[in-house]
Amino acid sequence: MDLIDYSTAQLIRIRNLYAHFLFRNGGYEQALNIFQELDADPVEVISLYPSIIAGNLSKAEDQDGGSKLEGGNLKDAIEALVGFLTDWRRKVSKTLNTNGDTQSIKRVGSSTTLSSLSTNVDSVIAKSSIGLPLLAQLIDTTLLKAYLNSNDALVGPLLRVSNHCNVAESETLLLQHKKYRELVDLYRGKGLHRKSLQLLAK
């Protein structure tokens, strides 16, 4: 690694640490904007949230000090997360649709003015603990959770388009929230027509 590459890597690391600091202290929107600029690993960012959003990935309980993620703080943090997830969803979906490549992902749609400070999406996928198909599933399922806990009017539009939501987990969430119409949308989108008809018959 030459000096320029090393300096860029250090700057990325410092900005990532700063984003974590902001998040712990209630600066959710600014923190998520930085994470988005850096193409931060979605697994890393999602893990900052409590289990209601991050499930088993949650490390929120391990964080010392800072603002507690509950009540209004949690709502603000979730709203900030939506933009981050939507940006990653666009990158992942576009790559899957155009290349059909489940092993790598090319960088798309990032601002050229931020490119020198941003990690390459290829490297994020390579270093991620999960592959691209599971990453797509994690992003969409987490986005569903975020909508259910912040703006449930967006649940239907998410499920009526092509998505990678985990069916079993999404089914449980939608039943818990009594989102039966949206559950029909999920079934139809996944080709589960029998389940859709059974639900409509009830």
Image (spheres, rainbow, N blue to C red):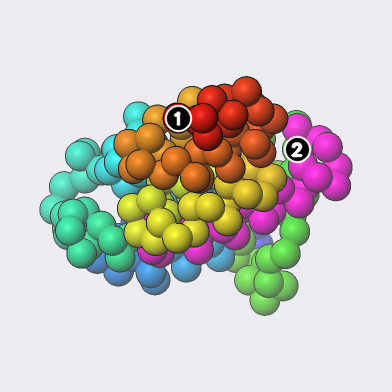
Question: How far across and how far down the image is residue 123, in percent?
Answer: 66, 43
Q: In terms of secondary structure, where does tag 2 sit?
A: loop
Residue furthest to the left: 65
Verify whether residue 147 appears in magenta: no
- Identity, as a three-letter code, of the amino acid under mark 2: Ser
Q: Residues within 10 Å of mark 1 (few under 14, many from 20)?
A: few
Residue furthest to the front: 201
Look at the magenta stretch and give its main secondary structure.
Answer: helix
Q: Total number of numbered labels?
A: 2
State which mark lies toward you, 2 or 1.
1
For the record, the magenta segment spans 78-102
Residue drawn where x is 33% and y is 43% of the image: 177
Does residue 36 appear in the picture of this structure? yes
Q: Residues within 10 Å of mark 2 (few under 14, many from 20)?
A: some
| Rendered view: 194 above or below 71 | above
| Rendered view: 135 above or below 76 | above
- For the residue pair 189 and 101, the one nearer the viewer reads as 189
Which residue is the site of mark 1? 202
Whether label 2 touches label 1, CB < 8 Å: no
Question: How far across and how far down the image is residue 157, in percent?
Answer: 58, 56
Question: How far across and how far down the image is residue 134, in percent?
Answer: 59, 31
- Identity, as a three-letter code, of the amino acid under mark 1: Lys
Q: Which mark is residue 24?
A: none
Residue drawn where x is 66% and y is 28% of the image: 193
Residue drawn where x is 60% and y is 65% of the image: 117
Q: Which mark is residue 104?
A: 2
129 with respect to 44 (left or right) = right
- For the residue pair 52 and 182, the one nearer the viewer reads as 182
